[in-house]
Image (cartoon, helix red, strand yellow):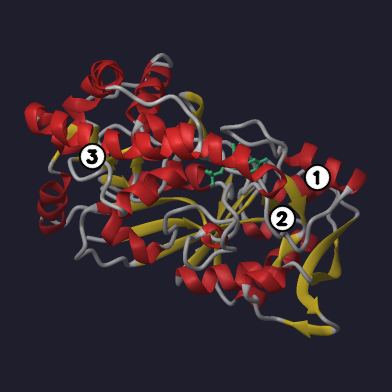
Amino acid sequence: MSNCAIVGINWGDEGKGRMVDLLTEDYDIVVRFQGGGNAGHTVKNELGKFALHLLPSGIFRKGVMNILGNGVALDPENLLTEIKDVRSKGISITPENLMISDRASLLLPWHRDLDELEEQRLKDKKYGSTKQGIAPFYSDKYQKKTLMAGELFYPDKLLSHLKDIMEWKDLTLTSVYGHEPYTMDMLEDWLRRSCEGIMPFIKNTGAFLKKASKEGKNILFEAQLGSLRDLDYGIYPYTTSSNTMAAFAPIGSGLPSARIDDIVGVVKAYSTCVGEGPFVCEMSGDEAEKLREAGNEYGAKTGRPRRVGPIDIVATRYGVEVQAATEIALTKLDVLSYMEEIPVCVRYEIEGQETDDFPFPLALEDAKPVIKYLPGWKTDISGIRSFEALPREAREYVKFIEENISCPITYISVGPERHSIIIRK
Ligand code: GDP
């Protein structure tokens, strides 16, 4: 048996989905352990191109069980839409290949409203939320003011619990934000429209995982976003509201006793960042536009143009360290093929001092990137499948990153398709 976590090392959008899609070949179970439908994993394989938001990326593999763990923000409405969309492209999704933890908490209809209302209140101080209700959801979960999916099977108790929460939430909606209150009619309608459809998938997934683990099944834990968006270790408050760390996988998956043998950290060959917050190595103008176009860097969920920059060694090294990554998948190397020379942010300069250490979030605002240029390769590498066949400059670029982040780069992707990959083990 071997367990693996696939996690993001940077700000998210590193290409985790494509790595999960590739590596699920060797796994029996894929579990999403945190986050909600507020980001997207894009997967391109022989079945088509898919933008997944909440569904685990193992959904395309026959014989793989996909689980939404207790740590996710379960938005029933969005999940049903996503299931319908993926099914319409010929993928079978049944309780035979998808299960939802009965302990996953439900994102309630007002969470999206609150996200929107709070961003409006903040005006130019907004956090850049995707307005999917994730922050209000997690704060309510920790206040114990939401429902667990398993409660749907106890209709009488469910309605009285939901009424209590609604009365409490209506206070905030009406008196703080001047919003219309919710009513039980609205919520009963939501239960019928959005929750009944997910009930066949809701199971005691903790018991399933425990049994599977005893039987020696291989489990893959799939994270959303990346190290720098982790609630505790990221660029707070411009983080997400959950823990994106491999260390959280056992807790959020429903198998708290899990041992993770291998942690694959996904690093993009350059940097991107969606939304607000400090982004030390940000490029601007034409240079940025070219990279954004080459990498097609627009948000999978929102279509927002992503902020772009050179690879940030300081942030990446920190990301690798906090994830305790055992190996690295470097993605989108092909995107850099147009560059004459390739910028790399090797250190930060803060108040005249150069540093290799990732600083406290507030200090990031004063940090400036120290850029080194490495020679480009100026040739299409998307058809290359072995490390030795890469141009010397591309090999040097990979080795430079590897040496500076102190973690072996074992996968290099050179295109979005499942097999556009160089395996270096
Ligand atoms: P995730 O959330 O970490 O899975 O990342 P996203 O799906 O948001 O972003 C990765 C994007 O890059 C997707 O559109 C992928 O199809 C694409 N992609 C992944 N790997 C490669 C690669 O090696 N080369 C190119 N050109 N595109 C890639």
Residue tagged 1: 291
Distance from the alpha carbon under mark 3 to that under mark 2: 40 Å
Residue tagged 3: 147
Label whose residue precedes the other's in the sequence (3 or 1): 3
The kind of secondary structure element at disc 2 is: loop
Point 9% across, 33% down: residue: 157
Amino acid type, label 1: Leu
The kind of secondary structure element at disc 3 is: loop
Where residue 352 sits, quadrant-wise, is bottom right
Position of 31 with respect to 420 (left or right) is left
Q: Is mark 1 within 8 Å of ligand 1?
A: no
In the rendered image, residue 141, in percent from the top left (x then y), is placed at: 31, 49
Q: Is residue 335 above or below residue 89?
A: below
Residue tagged 2: 270
Given residues 201 and 290, the one toward you in this image is 201
In the rendered image, residue 166, in percent from the top left (x then y), is placed at: 29, 33
Point 40% across, 36% down: residue: 54
Amino acid type, label 2: Tyr
